[in-house]
Image: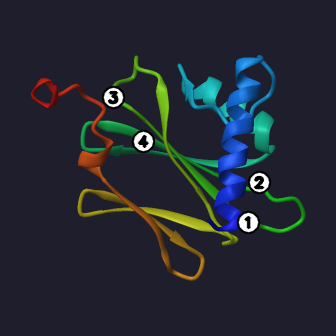
Amino acid sequence: MYPRSLFVILALWLSTALAAEGETRMFAFSAQTTKDLTASLETSYGSLKLEEIKLERIDVLVAIVDPASGTSRKSALLYTRKSKDAPWMLLLYRATNSSSIAISVEGGSLIAYSKGGRKLFIVPAEAMNLGFDATEQ
């Protein structure tokens, strides 16, 4: 296991433990409104860049944050929701050592690129399906 992935696992565990006690957490796993989610992320990270995207029938919110102190290392948090009334749910957290992350929609997939042009993640629209499929039960 790599030290960076160990750190991410530890941070997620600590965030969950603190959330259970009602303390400040690393990031919100869900939020009812965009305003609540933005407030939580701003409290955790200070500054952030938000991008709202409509991918097929799913609302997607990508938050680009800088969790490092002193060096510019961006991380991406990907939230999805099925409708305006549904809460935002965390789908993906991707830590990088890139100083910027660019998001684009290509061929029905959401793709994140690092400053150097490397693909950080590709999430197809069908992978973001938040619906219930009775045939899978």
- The answer to which of marks 1 and 4 sits earlier in the sequence is 4
Name the residue: 68% across, 38% down.
13
Q: Earlier in the sequence, mark 4 or mark 2?
A: 4
Q: In this orientation, does residue 20 appear?
A: yes
Residue type at mark 1?
Arg
Classify mark 4: residues with Cα within 10 Å, few (<14), some (14-19) or many (20+). many
* Residue 73: image location, x then y, percent: 73, 66
Q: Which of labels 4 and 2 is toward the front? A: 2
Q: Give the distance between the C-alpha atoms of the residues marked 4 and 2, in whole angstroms.
A: 21 Å
Q: Give the amino acid type for the residue marked by disc 3 in the picture.
A: Lys
For the point 57% across and 82% down, which residue is it?
A: 116
Q: What amino acid is labelled 2 in the image?
A: Pro
Mark 3 and mark 4: Cα distance apart in space: 9 Å
Does 129 sit above or below residue 97? Answer: above
Instruction: Classify 98 as above or below 41.
Output: below
Q: Position of residue 133 (x, y in %)?
A: 16, 28
Secondary structure under the numbered disc 4 in the rendered image: strand
The amino acid beneath tag 4 is Val
* Mark 1 vs mark 2, CA separation in Å: 7 Å
Q: Which residue is mark 1?
A: 73
Identify residue for label 4. 60
Reading the image, the residue beneath label 2 is 67
- Residue 31 point in image, percent of width and height: 56, 24
- Of the two numbered discs 1 and 3 on the same chain, state the one appearing first in sequence: 1
Question: Quick check: 81 left or right of 129?
Answer: right
Residue nearest the viewer, comparing 40 with 104: 40
Task: From the image, state whether disc 3 or disc 2 is nearer to you.
Answer: 2
Q: What mark, if any, has residue 82 been given in the picture? A: 3
User: Depth check: 20 or 40 in front?
Assistant: 20
Residue located 42% across and 41% down the image: 60
| Circles 1, 4 touching at the beta carbon (< 8 Å) | no
Q: Are marks 3 and 2 in contact (CB under 8 Å)?
A: no
